[in-house]
């Protein structure tokens, strides 16, 4: 089953890759690795929600936003590689714009991680990860996700 078919089975659609908001590209392929820029929870060019997790945005909503970020990361990867050539997810970096007392940061980033595991499976979807709480994110986004994937070796 293709990545797009797996997403469809989950009731999701691969979005159009978001345009960069500064001087960078959405994804870079180096050898058989693809690195994405940080992806915000943007749908159709608009930030879905703004604010700090734990005061303006609930942890549950932020987890859903992290999933949107992961979908946007897959869209960014599709600009430089065939998604069906992804062999495994190597790493996820998650950044949560959180209120000072908010500490449930890993649970928010699970929104991205759980989606990638559903799409790529327990073996190829599980990854190394960083989940960091930060004081601010671009555009006052509640969450930002970046991923690194390994592509299948091609002859």
Image: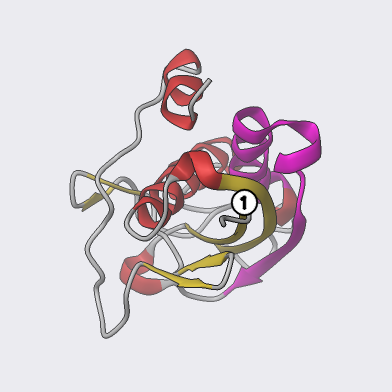
**Closer-to-camera residue (118/28):** 28
The extreme left residue here reads 45
The extreme front residue here reads 155
Q: Residue at x 35, y 35 (%)?
A: 14
Q: Quadrant of the C terminus?
A: bottom right
Q: Quadrant of residue 128?
A: bottom right
Q: Left of 40 or right of it: where is 147?
A: right
Residue 18 higher or lower than 1, as above or below: below
Question: Disc count in the image?
Answer: 1
> Main structural element of the magenta stretch: helix, strand or loop?
helix
Residue 117 higher or lower than 140, as above or below: above
Q: Left of 19 or right of it: where is 128?
A: right
Q: Is residue 110 magenta?
A: yes
Question: Disc 1 designates what residue?
Answer: 152
Q: Left of 138 or right of it: where is 130?
A: right
Q: Quadrant of residue 121?
A: top right
Q: Which segment did they paint magenta?
A: 107-134
Image coords of residue 9 (percent x, y): 48, 14
Mark 1 closeness class: few <14, some 14–19, many ≥20 residues within 10 Å: few
Q: Quadrant of residue 92?
A: bottom right
Q: Is residue 152 magenta?
A: no
Q: Residue at x 57, y 47 (%)?
A: 86
Q: Is residue 62 visible?
A: no
Q: How is the image coloured?
A: secondary structure
**Closer-to-camera residue (38/120):** 120
Quick one: SS at disc 1? loop
Image coords of residue 7 (percent x, y): 46, 25
Image coords of residue 143 (percent x, y): 50, 58
Q: Is residue 29 visible?
A: yes
Q: Residue at x 66, y 44 (%)?
A: 113
């Amino acid at each position: 089953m293709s990545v797009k078919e797996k997403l469809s089975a989950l009731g999701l659609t691969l979005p159009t890759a978001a345009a960069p908001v500064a001087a960078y590209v959405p994804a870079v392929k180096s050898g058989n690795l693809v690195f994405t820029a940080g992806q915000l929870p943007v749908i159709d060019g608009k930030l879905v929600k703004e604010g700090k997790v734990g005061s303006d945005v609930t942890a549950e909503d932020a987890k859903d936003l992290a999933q949107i970020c992961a979908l946007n990361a897959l869209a960014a990867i599709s600009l430089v590689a065939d998604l069906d050539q992804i062999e495994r997810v190597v790493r996820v970096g998650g950044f949560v714009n959180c209120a000072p007392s908010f500490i449930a940061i890993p649970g928010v980033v699970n929104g991205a991680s759980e989606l990638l595991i559903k799409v790529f499976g327990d073996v190829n979807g599980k990854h190394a990860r960083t989940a960091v709480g930060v004081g601010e994110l671009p555009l006052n986004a509640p969450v930002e996700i970046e991923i690194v994937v390994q592509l299948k070796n091609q002859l």
